[in-house]
Amino acid sequence: MENDSTAKSLKLFIVLSRAYKAINEHVNKFIQSNGLNPTEFAVLELLYHKGDQPLQQIGAKILLASGSITYVVDKLEQKGLLKRVACPNDRRVIFAQISDEGKNLIQGIFPEHAKRIDELMSSLTDSEKTEAIELLKKLGLPAGKF
Amino acid sequence: MENDSTAKSLKLFIVLSRAYKAINEHVNKFIQSNGLNPTEFAVLELLYHKGDQPLQQIGAKILLASGSITYVVDKLEQKGLLKRVACPNDRRVIFAQISDEGKNLIQGIFPEHAKRIDELMSSLTDSEKTEAIELLKKLGLPAGKF
DNA sequence: TATAATAATTTTGAAATCGAGATAAATAGA
DNA sequence: TCTATTTATCTCGATTTCAAAATTATTATA
């Protein structure tokens, strides 16, 4: 039998999972209604907001295995939403670069995406959101335990 | 350009996603080191803690499509960790019932699982966990917006 | 400069998931 | 009672993901 601290941590794990899944379910449906899957959207959004990225970095940032990056970048390239650009300094490296078409797509989707997330978060007041952000930030960087 | 409220909600969405993924990454590794994938573990744990469940209910509770339930229950049945039991009242319904072997497995894994989650949550104090639970509870039940 | 170690990407095969349709059983309504 | 609708499970094909191995390029070191 676990002690109180453990029981509380388990409870937190459960509500964290539920909250994440509840929000994500809606977010993903919206993304898919725009012809992208969540991974494709994550890649495009990263390129749109953070500029060209080596494939490797994309994998690191959105937590995707190298083989999966190849797959999703292929898909997006086939759709004309990004292109591969060779790195001039290091011939092992390939950058992904969002295309004009990709930019237009993200520009078209993102405002509504953001608005929906805001509505999905509307059960919290502004200051509760601030609290939640601070608490979740601490949880986001555990690592190095196992 | 989004307003402040939207920006804060987006920020919350990002830290929520990061926290969830950071915790889950470790939890899933531990589960997999015990020969189960996360979905299999979720099904077994549900049966262990909540008793026999119609396949339908399993799908509803762990958010899995009907075809996927058939697949994962097949896997667990093949491993001898659960069995299918016909419902006497309604011949459409099949219950999944954890086996003794399945119970032993969960009993063997769960305490360490709980302990690791507790350690992964150790960046929060006890009262911060309580706060986080209250805030995340509210986020977990949005629904009915889209 | 060779050689070995490291790094980035792609290939391959298997596993997990979904959605749509098929099947079988139960329920509601005429 | 018959028929239509709903419900539960399964089947099937396609998509997405991973992990391990292969390929190619770079860097470190002897």
Image (cartoon, coloured by chain):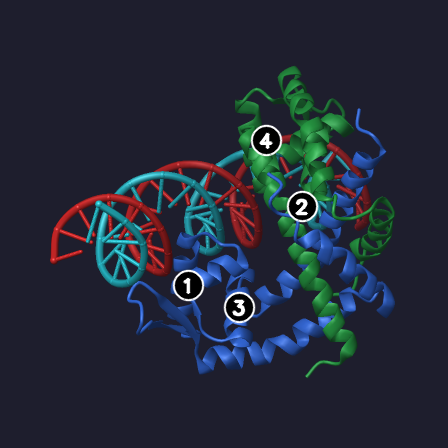
Chain colours: A blue, B green, C red, D cyan
Quarter of the image where the N terminus of chain A is located: top right
How far is mark 2 from mark 3, CA to CA?
22 Å
Mark 1 sits on what residue? A55
Q: Are marks 2 and 3 on the same chain?
A: no
Could you tell me if residue B143 is visible in this image?
Answer: no
Mark 3 sits on what residue? A35
| Residue in the image at 67% along x and 45% along y | B63
Mark 2 and mark 3 residues within 8 Å of each other at the beta carbon = no
Helix, strand or loop status at disc 1: helix
Considering only vertical position in the picture, is B23 above or below A103?
above
| Residue in the image at 50% along x and 66% along y | A43
Label 2 is placed on what type of residue? Leu
Please report, as a chain letter, where disc 2 is located: B
Of the residues tagged 1 and 3, which is closer to the observer? Answer: 1
Mark 1 and mark 4 residues within 8 Å of each other at the beta carbon = no
Label 3 is placed on what type of residue? Gly
Helix, strand or loop status at disc 4: helix
In the rendering, at what x and y percent does residue A70 appear? 39, 59
In the rendering, at what x and y percent does residue B82 appear? 62, 23
Could you say which is closer to the camera, residue A44 or residue C13? A44
